[in-house]
Image: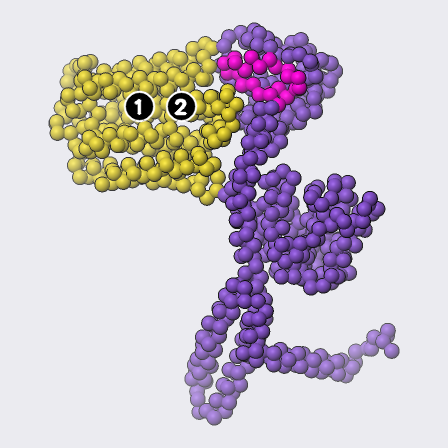
Chain colours: A yellow, B purple
Amino acid sequence: MIHFLAFLSYIAAFGLWIFLLVRGARGRWAPLPSGFTAFAAILHGAALVQFWRAYGELPLVGPGAALSSLAFVGGVALVAVLPMREVARVALTLLPFVILLQGVALALGIRPSPFPLDFQGAGFVLHVALAFLGYQGLALAFAAGVLYLIQHHELKGKRFGRFFQFIPPLAILERVGRIGLWLGFVSLTLALAVGWAWTVQNRGSLEMTDPKVLWAVMSWFVFLGILGARGGKGRSEYRSALAAVVGFAVVIGMYLALRVTEGGSGLFL
Amino acid sequence: MPLAVVGVSHETAPVDIREKVAFGSAEAGDALLALRKEAGVDEAVILSTCNRTEVYLFPVREERPIRAVERLLAGKAGPTPRPLGSYVFQEWGEGAVRHLFHVSAGLDSMVTGEAEIQGQVKEAYQRASTLPVFPPMAGPVLNRLFQMALAVGGRIRSETPIGEGTASVASVAVELARKIFGSLKGKRVLILGAGIAGELIAEALTREGVEGVVVATRTYDRAVNLARKHRGHAIPFEKIHEALPSVDIVLSSTAAPYPVLTRSIVRDSFQEPRRHPLLIIDIAVPRDVDPAVGDEPEVFLYNVDDLRKIVDEHVRTREGALPEAQRIIAAHSEEFRSWYASLEVVPVIQDMRKQAKAFREAELERLFRGLAHVSPEDRERIEAFARRLQNKLLHDPTVRLREGMAAGGGPGLVDAARLLYGLDEVQAADERRGRDERAALDEEAPKKGSKPDPGVP
């Protein structure tokens, strides 16, 4: 029930961000979207705590529970940027992703996985948390990248309407994208390292054909590609933003493809 | 409501008249004191800006204060092409209230929604409040009026887009630069030409923190002078392609009849594809920058028409906010009217309480004369009971009187209350007592040996 309320709160917060975009960011309504976003994230946190208390395990295993936790990391990322007035507007593009994740999680059912795990412990929790942080870092870069492309389009096209007024400056979006990418890349790298060490220690070897391993490794290479696109000589900020958007789409596409073809284990997100 | 505003504004007088009647801060203080001394004005505030000189007066029950202000303005203006009276406007009562609210919100300004006026209204009010005179020139009514005007101005600015965007080309150029670079601190600007509009934009950019200024004009000496002004350095005009890769903003306003920046110059100047954006503002007519330059990646090119487009967009947004702003002003004007109306009933309520207290004290005295055996504690209890009873009996009529006045009850309601409670007798008794006391003091004075005024025969 609380999960569903959090889902509705995220939708309401997104609606308020849209309202602010249309109406102009001023007046007594201005703090409302930020407030609702924070409220939704707190509610979501409470729902996950309730899950943990009810089932005695962290909501990291099983598609529904894991997707909800991944959405929660996005909610927390948003709460972290809310005090920065202009940066907070990335909520406009990040919230739909959080809503989508939570919606899918609700549709799949947020409950523990019926399959017992081979091994758990601190290493497992660290691995999953770092991986989620990695994916949300990429999501943040994607959100900033989308806004960058829109603002760039408005500035080039000399359109000075609501989008131009509402979307943060290009330099700020570039910085947010860069932070998201590096944070995500470092987190995912650590997640892979921890996951590898933990699996080898407990199982003796790492099965590379496991869809979640495959996805994580492919995602890591996508990260590498995006960072390469940013760092190369003469690469414009525009191309960097484009690379983040395309890279994120590729990661999501890979996930969907793997879920369809290889998702039989039930443990894969 | 005996409130009035008299003055000249950009809507009633040209600038050559307005500048003659403009008051400096010290002058305005002196003028207020003169109005108090010569016309017996209780409360007054002078608001003087480049667009207006207005005097707010309270109470105005006769023409005398108005004539005094007109004389004051005429004396300040000196000879004028037409009699000064033909430039002067007056607003009375609620019209004066609405006028000040419009002024404070920037709705009466030349550029609708400009924010500077709010500070000027505050300054005028504070000047009147802090004059070393008693009672203060901004007394209870003007104090409340100006406080409310400042609140109305703030509310309209925060709740409507009336102050959104900027309405000058220079500010729009800064806004564009901010939308690209965020903070302008440390950014480098190349100024081409020495046009006045270009210089205004350069000044606005420098105020925002632009640091490295490079100037190139056809005449090197002019470039050096302009560079010195902006603490930058000059380069020969032929070397602008060398400066291009290292700057973030190019501001062009030369008088050249042909483009001085072409796509090939810009492209050749970059050794490699540009990573960071380059903002080019071309305000020259004919244009200095070939429009094809805008097709280069990471180059954002705007000409004077583009800047005007943003200005027009802002003006449209501001005008769209007018109905909402008017609604807020109407609501607050009504609030002020209600507050003022409730103020008129204060003397009636004071008389009612005075009368009730007199009745209570007389009845208690009569009661205690026949109850000599009552202990002091019981006596206090009976007195407290009488006070509570008096307060309870007066509470509802007091509240209803205030509400009735706020709802537009007018003088009829005050008269009715005075008649029902017989308050005119209380007032007459007060006046009699006052006269008696003054007479007694006059009789006492010679007895105490005070010397008679030598000027009095």
User: Label 1: how many residues lie within 10 Å, few (<14), some (14-19) or many (20+)?
Assistant: many
Can residue A132 be found in the magenta stretch?
Answer: no
Left or right of B43 on screen, residue A53: left
Left or right of B304 on screen, residue B158: left
What chain letter is assigned to the residue under label 1?
Answer: A
State the extent of the magenta-drawn residues as a range.
B281-304
Q: Position of residue B197 (x, y in %)?
A: 67, 25
Q: Secondary structure at mark 2?
A: helix
Residue B189 can be seen, yes or no: no
Labels 2, 1: one chain = yes
Q: Quadrant of residue B378?
A: bottom left
Q: Position of residue A39 (x, y in %)?
A: 34, 40
User: Which residue is located at x 69 percent, y 61 percent?
Assistant: B60
Amino acid under label 2?
Answer: Val
Q: Secondary structure at mark 1?
A: helix
Question: Which corner quadrant holds the C terminus of chain B?
Answer: bottom right
Left or right of A18 on screen, residue B434: right
User: Which residue is located at x 23 percent, y 31 percent?
Assistant: A105
User: Which residue is located at x 48 percent, y 89 percent?
Assistant: B367
Question: Which corner quadrant holds the N terminus of chain B?
Answer: bottom right
Residue A220 can be seen, yes or no: yes
User: Which residue is located at x 57 percent, y 27 percent?
Assistant: B309
Q: Position of residue B123 (x, y in %)?
A: 65, 47
Where does label 1 land, which residue?
A: A135
